[in-house]
Amino acid sequence: MTPRTLRHGQRCEVWTAPADGGQPELAFVTAETLFEAPNWLADGRLLLNGGGRLWFLAPDGGGPEPLPATGLPPVNNDHVPAPDGTAAFCSADDGHIYRVPLAGGAAERVTHDDGARHFLHGVSPADGGRLAYVEIHDGDVRRRGRLAILDLADGAVALPDVGDGHCDGPEFTPDGAWILLNTESFGRVAGHARPPRRRPGARGPGRPCRLGRRASQDRGVRRPGDHERQQLGARQQPVRVRRLPDRGRAPIRRVRPLREGIQPSPRQ
C-alpha cells in the first residue's frame, strides 16, 4: 500500500492543545509530508507517522526526526507507545504489528501469520503485555473487522464478542479493566458507529456508552500523568473533540471545535 501524500497546494499542520480547552498551539507545518496520528511520549516529544516511517517531533521547536528502525515495513497511522517508554507498537502495511525500540534498532513482529491484517489501537497500560487490535481476514478491508486481544507473553489471541457490526479503534481504559471501541452493532443506520465498552474477558457484545453521535476511530484515552494536552490531527471535515467518561453517566464534555482539515489524497 502506498503511503498517503499531500495534494498539490496542501499542507500538513501538527497542533497540540490543553485537554481543559485552552488555546491550541501550532507545533509544525509542512507542505512536503503528510504526518498523522501524533502520540505523546514520556519525554514530551510526539511520535508520528509520515511517508511510511515513524518520526519524533519536539512540539516546542525543531523539525521531525526519523526513528532509525531496521526490518520495519512501511507503517500506517496505527501506532501506540509502550507504557514503559522504551518502545512503540505499530501496524505495518504487510498486515502485521511490530514492536519498535524508541532508541532505534531492529523491529520485532509480534502477530501471527493467520491470514488476517492486524490494525493496532490499544496497549494495556500496566505492563504493555496485551495488545487490542482489529483483524480483517483475507486482506479485504471491505470486510467486517473484529476485535482481537493478543497476549504477548504466550501468543494467545482472544476474540471477544462485540456484536455483528464492524468495529474499530479498541483501546484499554487507564486501569486496564475495560476496552473502549467503536462499532456499528448498536447503530440504527448503516455506517453509524457508537462507542461501547466491555471487559476484556467478558461474554456478550458489551454495553453502548450514552453517546448519540457518530463516532470515529480517532479516539484517545487520557491517561493519568499526561501533559494535560490532547493531540489534534488533520481532518477531512469539521469535527469536535469530546471527552467521554469511561464509566458511569458523567456528562460528555466538549473540549474544543476543530477547524476544517485538509483532505489528503487517497491511497493508491
Image (tube, grey):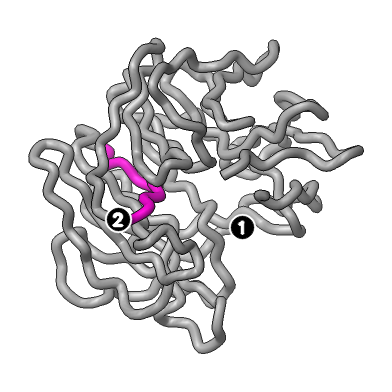
Give 207 or 78, whichever is nearer the viewer. 78
| Numbered label attached to residue 7 | none
Q: Quadrant of residue 248?
A: bottom left
Q: Which residue is mark 2?
A: 115
Cα distance between the residues tagged 1 and 2: 40 Å
On screen, residue 190 above or below 71: below
Which element type, helix, strand or loop, lies under badge 1? strand
Residue 46 % position (x, y) = 54, 25
Asked if the stretch drawn in magenta spans residue 121, the answer is yes
On screen, residue 125 above or below 209: above
Which element type, helix, strand or loop, lies under badge 2? loop
Q: Residue at x 72, y 29 (%)?
A: 33
What kind of residue is marked 2?
A: Gly
Q: Earlier in the sequence, mark 1 or mark 2?
A: 2
What kind of residue is marked 1?
A: Arg
The crowd level at tag 1 (other Cα within 10 Å; few <14, some 14-19, many 20+) is few
Asked if the stretch drawn in magenta spans residue 26, the answer is no
Is residue 58 rendered to the left or right of residue 92?
Answer: right
Q: Which residues are magenta?
A: 116-125
| Numbered label attached to residue 254 | 1
